[in-house]
Image: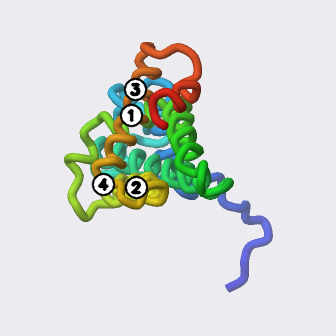
Amino acid sequence: MKQNADAKPPGPRKTYHHGDLRKVLLDAARAEIAAHGAQGLSMASLARRAGVAQSASYRHFTDREDLLAAVATDGFERFTEVLLEAASDGDDVTALKRMAVAYLVFGEKNVELYRLMFASGLVPGAASDSALKHAATASFQPLLDRVRASDPAASYLSAHVKWGQLHGLVMLKADGFIHGPVEALMDAVFF
């Protein structure tokens, strides 16, 4: 079939298509959570922030809770990477302390994400085979491994106590009860 030389090329598309809308929505959700916390996030506000129709977000997330679980899962995965990097960046003797400082810094820099991960009730309510539950469990493993490496007789409970100390410091700082750097408290409280 011969093409007409005078034919005009098709006009611009009338709809907008994101290359990776799931990523765009997650990025928009992280930005919204960082700025205002998770409590105010809605699928409608997320769609507006991403520049898409509200119905487009439901192609990737069944509802708001599914979206928040995805953000928290990503947060736990990043958190685990931070802890593992801190533990491996030096000698084994100070690995636990470096990991503890990395924990505190992550919590301070990502307060609202941290709240979503640890204080929202998402993890306790997640299915045992969910990505969120797996990511949350995996984030505890580096701390458990380092506690046991520094004291082979240490128990699972010992690691939870250290975790509780770190979590408490992050939350006290976030809620304005501790002023100044929480890392300065490490020697007095944690070790």
Q: What is the spatial separation of the Cα atoms under label 1 and label 4, in whole angstroms?
A: 15 Å
Residue nearest the observer in this picture, 134 or 140: 140
Q: How would you rate the neighbour count of disc 2 (Cα within 10 Å): few for under 14, some for 14-19, many for 20 or more?
A: many
Place of residue 144 in the rendered image (x, y in percent of width and height, measured from the top left): 40, 55
Identity, as a three-letter code, of the amino acid under mark 3? Met
Which mark is first along the chain, 2 or 3? 2
Mark 3 and mark 1: span between their CA atoms?
A: 10 Å
Please tell me whether residue 97 is drawn above or below residue 143 in the rendered image. above
> Is 173 on the left or on the right of 9, as rendered?
left
Disc 4 element: helix
Name the residue nearer the viewer: 115 or 171. 171
Q: Residues within 10 Å of mark 1 (few under 14, many from 20)?
A: some
In primary-sequence order, the first of circles 3 and 1 is 1
Q: Residue 5 occupies which quadrant of the picture?
A: bottom right
Residue pictured at 59% horizontal, 44% vertical: 98
In the picture as drawn, the residue positioned furthest to the bottom comes out as: 1
Mark 4 highlights which residue?
156
**Residue wearing tag 2:** 144
Query: How many marks overall?
Result: 4
Is residue 16 something that shows in the picture?
no
Q: Which residue is mark 1?
A: 165
**Residue 24 on image: x %, y %:** 53, 47
Asked if the residues shown at circle 4 and circle 3 are in contact, with their CB atoms under 8 angstroms apart, the answer is no
Q: Could you tell me if the residues under marks 4 and 2 are in contact, i.e. CB atoms within 8 Å?
A: yes
Colour pattern of the rendering: rainbow
Q: Secondary structure at mark 1?
A: helix
- Tell me whether the residue at label 3 lies in contact with that at label 2, contact meaning CB atoms closer than 8 angstroms: no
